[in-house]
Amino acid sequence: MLLLGLPVLLFALITWQVVADGPLVGADERLSRALVHPDGASELLADLGNVQVAVPVLAVALACAARHGRATGTDRWWLPPVAAAVAMLLVPALVAPLKEWTDRPGTPAVPPAVGYYPSGHTATAVVAYGAATLLLLPLLGSAVLRRALVLLCAALVLGVSFGLVRRGYHWPLDVVASWCLGAVLLVCLSLVVSRSTRRSSAGTPSRRTGPS
């Protein structure tokens, strides 16, 4: 519950500050002015949060997890991939109404517009790369590979986040709020994946009755 409660509370606090134009917003804008420096590297990093980039990565992980679960005869092998796909679908379903409700303007580095809170690119990166990692971790037998995968996921998410702020596409609080939103979805997904893994390890009878 703590893993869910903390990001929910932080997200609620940030959202309240954005809607009420509280003191955190002023600090956020000052931090943005200090960090914004548009360049090619920040543009490239920000693009890693595009749906066209992140979702295909998740799709590959979905296919690998489904294939492995079915090949090993895992009971309800389809559940973790389906749960990951649902988590990804929830990103636009949650972000779009929040953008419209908060109506936050963009930074001076982008054309005048509203609807920048929370960051859709950040949420996409967190959930797509995070869900892919959660699905692939049980498939890796080496602790070194598992650590490398987690580090790669963290590097991708942080890279996207930095790129969005550095390029000026989003205020820092837009990005942090999406971390919180993504964390909630990933914690829920991890519960599904871990439960499925425990069932498989405990020897839950498979639906297969013939020889493998």
Image: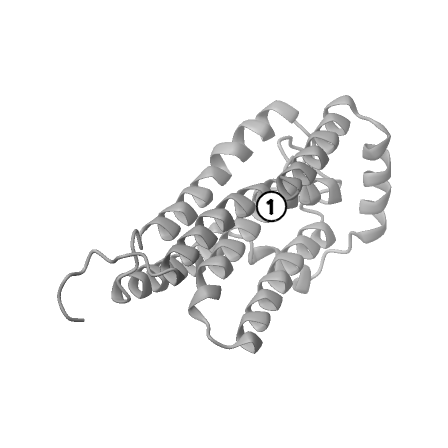
| Residue 170 visible at all | no
Residue in the picture at 64% in, 44% down: 3
In the picture shown, does residue 151 fall above or below 118? below
Amino acid tagged 1 = Ala
Give the side of residue 201 with respect to residue 71, left or right.
right
Q: Is residue 166 above or below residue 184?
A: below
Label 1 element class: helix
Q: In x, y percent, where is residue 9?
A: 70, 33
Image coordinates of residue 59 in percent, x first then y, are: 38, 57
Tell me the residue that label 1 is attached to. Answer: 183
Residue at the front extreme, as displayed: 202
- Vertical order, 171 against 60 (above or below): above
Decide which of 59, 198 is in the foreground and name it. Answer: 198
**Residue located 13% across and 66% down the image:** 210
Residue at 30% x, 59% y is 74
Residue 181 lies left or right of residue 56; in this view the side is right
User: Is any atom of residue 142 visible in this view?
Assistant: yes
The quarter of the image holding the C terminus is bottom left
- Report the front residue among 21 and 106: 21
Number of marks present in the image shown: 1
**For the N terminus, which image quadrant?**
top right
- Residue 172 image-quadrant placement: top right
Place of residue 126 in the rendered image (x, y in percent of width and height, measured from the top left): 57, 51
